[in-house]
Amino acid sequence: MPPAAAPDALAAHWLAETVRIREAHWGPLEDSEAVRQALRQAGSFEDRVLLRARALGEREGLPATLRRWRHAAFATLALLACAAVLAGAGAATAALGDGSRPTNVLWALGTLLGLHLLTLLLWLSSFLLGGSEGSWLGQAWLWMTRRLARGPDAALAPQALTALLARNGSLRWLLGAVSHAWWLVALVAALLTLLVVLSTRRYGFAWETTLLHPETFVRLTHAVGWLPAQLGFPLPDAATVRASDGMQALPPDARTAWSGWLIGALAVYGIAPRLLAWALCAWRARRSLRRLGIDPALPGYANLRERLAPSVERLGIDAPDDRAYMPRLDRAGGGAGSAAVMAGIELPPDLAWPPFPVAEGVHCPEVLDTREQRKALLDALSQHPPARLLLACDARQTPDRGSLALIVELAALAARTGIWLMGAGSEPDRTPQWRERLAAAGLAAAPVLTEAGDAARWLEHGDG
Amino acid sequence: MAEPVPILKVAVVGHTNTGKTSLLRTLTRDGSFGKVSDSPGTTRHVEGSRLLAEGRPVLELFDTPGMEDGIALLEYLERLQQPGERLDGPARVQRFLDGPEAHGRFEQEARVLRKLLDCDAALYVIDARDPVLGKHRDELAILASCGRPLLPVLNFVGSPPHRADEWRAAMSRLALHAQVEFDTVAPALDGEQQLYSRLGMLLDRHRSTLTALMADLDRQRAARRVAAGRLVADMLIDIAALRLPVRTGEDERAALELLRGKARRREQQCVEALLALYRFRPEDYAAEPLPLADGRWGMDLFHPQALKDMGISLGKGMAAGAMAGATLDAFTAGLSLGTATILGAAAGGLWQGADRLGQRMLGRIRGWRELTVDDAVLRLLALRQQALVRALERRGHAARDPMRLPPPADEPLRKGPLPDALPEARSQPSWSTLSADYADSPRREAVARALAEQLSAEAPDAAAPPAAR
C-alpha cells in the first residue's frame, strides 16, 4: 500500500484501530493469512500493521461498517446543518419580532448573539481548564450518529475513531470544527434572513428602560458599534439613539442606521469570531490528521511486533544428522600378571592426586591431560598389560567423545577396568551421563564406583 | 538511513555441553531454538538464526555441535602435513575437510570447522565451572588455526563455584585477550551490549553493523518496557474500575467469588501478555494465586474526577438543552429570548446529570451495594507485575526452570498512596473492560498512559526490593 493521502490514511488507521479494539475485547482473530499477506510487502512495522488490519477487516466486513458509519455521520452533519439554518433564520425573525411594534434593539442583539457568545466563551475556557473532550456540539454530532448508525460492530466505529483521534490530539479540533461550522451556518442564515427581512419589511427600532438613564444606551450603542463602524458599518449617532425611545416615529435614515448597526454587530461579533475559530480548528485538525501513526506500545500492537517485524529469522540447518561416531570397546585385553594401575583422566587440579596412598605394586602415573601423557600411559600399558585398571574421572565434567575414546583404548589393554567417578554428588553432578556414555561405549560390565573406599578396595582386591 | 551494512556471520563454537545453543537462545530471544539438555552431543548439526535491525538482517549466528575430540583431531591434523611441507592453518583445515575422516571419526568437528571457515568470527563458549584442560587447549589451537577472530564467552559465571579466573589466565596465555562474561540463564542487563562491543573490537570492518545492532536492541528493550508498562496499567485500571452490584441480602460470598474470579483471570491475561511480549512461554512462570481475601464495599461516587466529569456533563446538558430551547424560541418566534432557552437548559442539565449519577444513586436507594477489589490487592497486583517485568528483563531465553517471584514483602503494600490513576479508575465503572457497559474514553486512555509511564519509569533501576508505592 503506498503511503496514502490524508483521507485514505485516516480510513486505514481507523480500520486498524477498529480491529485492535475488537481484538482487545473479544480476543485475537485468526490472522495467519493476514500476517502472511503483510509480510509479503516490504515496509515498516506500522505499514504491516495497517496491511494486516486491512486484510482482517475485509474478511470481517468492517470497512462496510465504517462506511455506513461515515455515511451516517455525513447525514447527521446535513441534519445538523438544516437545524442550524432553521435556528439561525428563526433566531433572526424572532429577534426582529412581527413588526407590530418596534424591535427592542438590545433584545434583538441578545437573541442573535447571546447563546453564540456564551458557547464560544465556554469553548475558549476549555483551553484554560483543560480536560474537556471537545465541544458539546461535536459530541452531540457523535451521539446522534451513534443513534443513526446501527448494525453489528456499529459501536466499534465511533469508539475506534474517537480513541484514534484523541490519541492523535485531533479529536478536540475536529469536534471544534464541526461545532464552529454549525454556528457559522446558523449565523450566516441569521444574517441572510436579516438582510431579506429588513430589505422587504419595515421595522421600527427602540430601546426600552425603566431603571437606566437614556445616556447609558447611547454609550452602549457606540461601544457595540465602534468595531463594526471601523469596517464601514453605519453607527446611529447620539441624537438618533436618544430619539429611539419608542415614543416617537423614526426617520427612514435612523432605521437604516439601526439595521446596519444590527447587521454589523452580527457580522463582526458573530460570524467573524466563529470563522476564525473554525479556521483554527480546521487547520489544527488537518495538521494532526497528517501525523496519524501507529503507537506500537498499545496493547494489541506490542504483541504483534515479533510477528509482523520479526527481529529474528531462523536459517535452518546445514545437513541432517549423520550416524555419529562413538568409540566402542570390542574386547578387553588379556591381562597377564597381577599388576594394578590407577590413572586419573582429566582431573581438575583441586582434586588431590593420588587421592589415597597407593599400595605397593600399584602403578599410579600423573593425571592424564595432554596428548603426551596419554601416549606415555598407552605405551606403558601395552608393554605391561595390567590385571586391574582403575580409571578416575571427574563426575562434574561432561563425558565427551575424546575422553571415552581414551577410556576405551586404555580398557582394551587391561584385563579388567573399573571406573571411579570422583566428586559424584557435588554440583553439577553428571554421574548419570557418565553411566550412560560408558554403557554405550561397551563398558557396561565395568564397575562404576563413586566412593574412595570402594575404589581402593577394588584396586587391591578386584571387588567393590 | 545509513549505507547498507554487510551482514556479519558469527559461529558459536566450544567444547560439548558448554551452552552454545543456550547462548543462541538468549541472544536471539528464542526459547525454542535448537535442543538443550545437560548431556554431551545434544546439538548434532549447524543451525543458524539471523538478527534483524529495523527489518534489515545484520547478524547471522550459527550454533554448532560441540568439539569433543580435540586432542585426537589435532594429532590427526598434524599428521596431514607432509614432512617438509609448509601449510598454514586454514589450508591444513581445508585438507582435513576434503579428507575421509571429515565424514568419519571427526564428522562433528568437521561441521564446526567448515562453518567457522565460512564465518567472520567465532564466539568460543566456555563452561566456567570446568577446569582448563589439555583438550580445551588443543581444540582452541585447532579453532585458532582457522584464522578467524575468537571471542571467549564465559558462561555459567552466575553459579558460584566457577573457575573464570583460571580461564581468563589460560586465554591470555593463548593470546585471546578480549573476553566477555555472559551467563546465558541470567545475563546481565547490559550483557548483550558488552558481548557485541567486544566483538566489535575484534572486527573493525563490522563495527558499524554491530553498532546498528546494539542501537536496535536498545530501542527494542525500551519499546518492550513501555509496552509492558501499558499492559500492567491497563490491567490495574480494569481491576480497579471493576465493580459488582450486589443486592443487600443476596449471597455476598457468591459475589465475592465472582469478583475474585474476574480479577484473577484478568491478572492471568496480563501475565500471559507480558510473557508473550518478552517472548517467553506460559510455562516459564509459576504464578502464585492472587490472595484476594476480601472485597471492598462502597461507592466511589464522590471522587473529584467523577464530580468534575459530572459537572462537565451537566454543563453539556445545559448547553444542549439551551440549544433545543433556542431552536424552540426560533420556531415559536413570538416568545422572546429567555423562557424556552432557560427552561431547555435546566431540563437538559438535569437529564444528563441524572443519567450518570442518578442510576447509581437510585441503585443505592433500592438497596444495591457495589463490591470492588481492595486497595491492598491493587497494590499487590502492581508490585507483582512490576516484579515480573523486572524478572523477565533479566531472564535469559536459555533458562529452563520456571520463574518464581518471591512474594512481595507485606510492609510496602500498606504504605504510600495508590497511584493517582487508580482511585480515579475506581470512580469510573465503565472503564473496566471486565464490565458489561465498558466504554472507552479519551480520559481512560490518558490515565492509562500516565500510569504506564509511572510504572515503566519505576521498573528499571529497582533491582533491590521494590520501593513503596
Image (cartoon, coloured by chain):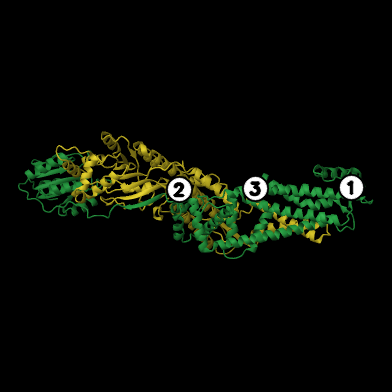
Chain colours: A green, B yellow
Q: Identify the chain of the residue marked 2, using the numbered disc in the image.
A: B
Question: Visible in this render: residue B247?
Answer: no
Observer-nearest residue: A292 or A2? A2
Disc 1 element: loop
Q: Amino acid at mark 1?
A: Leu
The disc at residue B389 is 2
The residue drawn where x is 78% and y is 57% is A89
C-alpha span from label 3 to label 1: 47 Å
C-alpha span from label 2 to label 1: 73 Å
Q: From the top left corner, tell me how far across and down residue A312 is, in percent.
A: 39, 50
Disc 2 element: helix
Observer-nearest residue: B181 or B363? B181
Residue beneath label 3, please? A283
| Neighbour tally class for label 2: few under 14, some 14-19, many 20 plus, Cα within 10 Å | many
| Neighbour tally class for label 1: few under 14, some 14-19, many 20 plus, Cα within 10 Å | few
Q: Identify the chain of the residue marked 3, using the numbered disc in the image.
A: A
Label pair 2/3, CB-CB below 8 angstroms: no
Specify whether B111 is left or right of B272: left
Q: From the top left corner, tell me how far across and down residue B75 is, in percent.
A: 17, 42
C-alpha span from label 2 to label 3: 42 Å
Residue beneath label 1, please? A211
Q: Identify the chain of the residue marked 1, using the numbered disc in the image.
A: A
Q: From the top left corner, tell me how far across and down residue A74 is, in percent.
A: 65, 59
Question: Visible in this render: residue B308?
Answer: yes
Q: Amino acid at mark 2?
A: Val
Q: Is residue A50 above or below residue A397?
A: below
Q: From the top left corner, tell me how far across and down residue B55 is, in percent.
A: 43, 48
